[in-house]
Image (spheres, grey):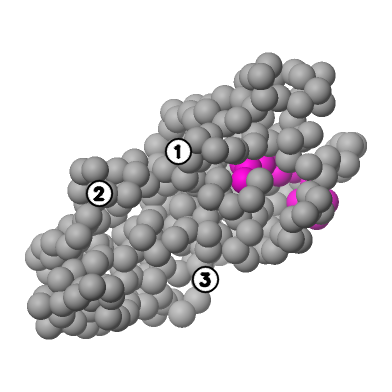
């Protein structure tokens, strides 16, 4: 399409296979939008497009992402307020006809799997390195490791005894993010082997739910039988978590952080599972079977789940089976 539709706080640029969302800067623009700056959303990442009346003489064009397509949406788990939804474009009511045109154009370009959950992230996560200040410590992520450095003024005795923490993403299965705008917000890492050991609520909290509670863990991730202690019930007692508070861990800092970690965890799990999938049935020497496995390997390579060196090595190994 190549056209541009400018709204309040954002501009959508329509390309042949995606929508480039550029967020404006300014005192009235939500800080999350300013933090994200811009996002390219492939049409394949969308499930539907809606146009509804907004407030105070506006209309709202919204692209609805497929479940599992966007790490930011997955990490947020339904906790974002409408005003901070990066998939909403608010327009003056007089542009409704133009907005309807673009909504129809987008609907016509939705992929055949639009109604199905995505099997991988299709929208890029915010880039590392990144960090933010929580109430009880500073969280950092360099793309490979998450680190927590405790503050003596806020960290619990349990965290001080455990010491500063570093978690390679290869040892994680997911991330839990509870909005700092909710009661007792936190960012909590889920180590491998503890996916099912979801802590209960703190005193006075409602039980966490798999949707809308900020809990995102990789399902079906391979993990060995590692002896681990039970997870502390409270996030303020868990060395794998940092807690928020008034002025700490704001959405525009902690949510992109959670999304980046979640994307890295899933990418590492996919790469770790790749050799077993590619080499399954290695005893067979059917050329058609090997060609299919090379094709699958190429898809993983193009998706960024396999490095150039890994792609070349596995392809050579498969060709050697002929």
Q: Residue 290 location in percent, x, y?
A: 54, 58
Element type at mark 2: loop
In the picture of the structure, the residue carrying the numbered disc 2 is 28
Tell me if residue 99 comes above or below residue 176 in the rendering: below
Residue 93: image quadrant is bottom left
Kindly check if marks 3 and 2 are in contact, taking CB atoms under 8 A apart as contact.
no
Residue identified by numbered label 3 = 117
Specify few, some or many for label 3: CA neighbours under 10 Å numbering under 14, 14-19, or 20 or more: some
Residue drawn at (45%, 38%) of the image: 253
Q: Residue at x 23, y 73 (%)?
A: 56
Along the viewing direction, whichever of 110 and 73 lies nearer the viewer: 73
Asked which secondary structure carries label 3, the reply is: loop
Label 2 – label 1 distance at C-alpha: 18 Å
- Neighbor class of circle 2 (other Cα within 10 Å; few <14, some 14-19, many 20+) is few
Residue 34 position, x and y percent, is 29, 43
Rendering coords of residue 320 (x, y %): 54, 45
Residue 36 sits inside the magenta stretch: no
Give the residue pinned by disc 1.
253
- State the image quarter where residue 317 is shown: top right
Asked if the residue under mark 1 is in contact with the one under mark 2, i.e. CB atoms within 8 Å, the reply is: no
Q: CA distance from mark 3 to mark 2?
A: 34 Å
* Residue 299 versus residue 305 in the image, above or below: below
């Amino acid at each position: 399409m190549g056209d541009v539709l400018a709204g309040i706080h954002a501009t959508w640029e329509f390309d042949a296979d995606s929508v480039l969302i550029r967020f404006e800067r300014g005192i009235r623009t939500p800080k999350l939008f300013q933090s994200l700056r811009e996002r390219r959303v492939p049409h394949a990442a969308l499930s539907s497009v809606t146009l509804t009346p907004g407030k105070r003489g506006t209309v709202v064009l919204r692209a609805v992402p497929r479940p599992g397509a966007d790490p930011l949406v997955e990490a947020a788990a339904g906790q974002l307020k409408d005003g901070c939804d990066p998939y909403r474009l608010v327009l003056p009511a007089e542009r409704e006809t133009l907005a309807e045109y673009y909504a129809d154009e987008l609907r016509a370009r939705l992929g055949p799997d639009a109604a199905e959950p995505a099997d991988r992230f299709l929208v890029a996560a915010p880039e590392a390195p990144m960090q933010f200040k929580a109430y009880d410590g500073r969280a950092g992520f360099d793309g490979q490791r998450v680190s927590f450095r405790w503050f003596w003024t806020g960290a619990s005795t349990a965290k001080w005894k455990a010491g500063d923490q570093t978690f390679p993403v290869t040892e994680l299965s997911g991330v839990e993010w509870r909005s700092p705008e909710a009661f007792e917000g936190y960012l909590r890492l889920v180590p491998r082997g503890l996916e099912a050991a979801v802590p209960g609520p703190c005193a006075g909290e409602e039980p966490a739910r798999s949707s809308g509670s900020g809990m995102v863990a990789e399902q079906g991730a391979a993990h060995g039988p590692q002896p681990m202690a039970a997870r502390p019930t409270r996030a303020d007692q868990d060395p794998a978590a940092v807690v928020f508070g008034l002025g700490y861990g704001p959405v525009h800092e902690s949510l992109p952080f959670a999304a980046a970690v979640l994307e890295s965890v899933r990418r590492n799990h996919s790469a770790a599972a790749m050799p077993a999938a590619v080499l399954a049935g290695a005893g067979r020497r059917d050329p058609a079977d090997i060609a299919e496995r090379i094709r699958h390997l190429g898809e993983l390579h193009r998706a960024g789940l396999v490095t150039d060196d890994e792609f070349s090595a596995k392809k050579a190994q498969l060709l050697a089976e002929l």
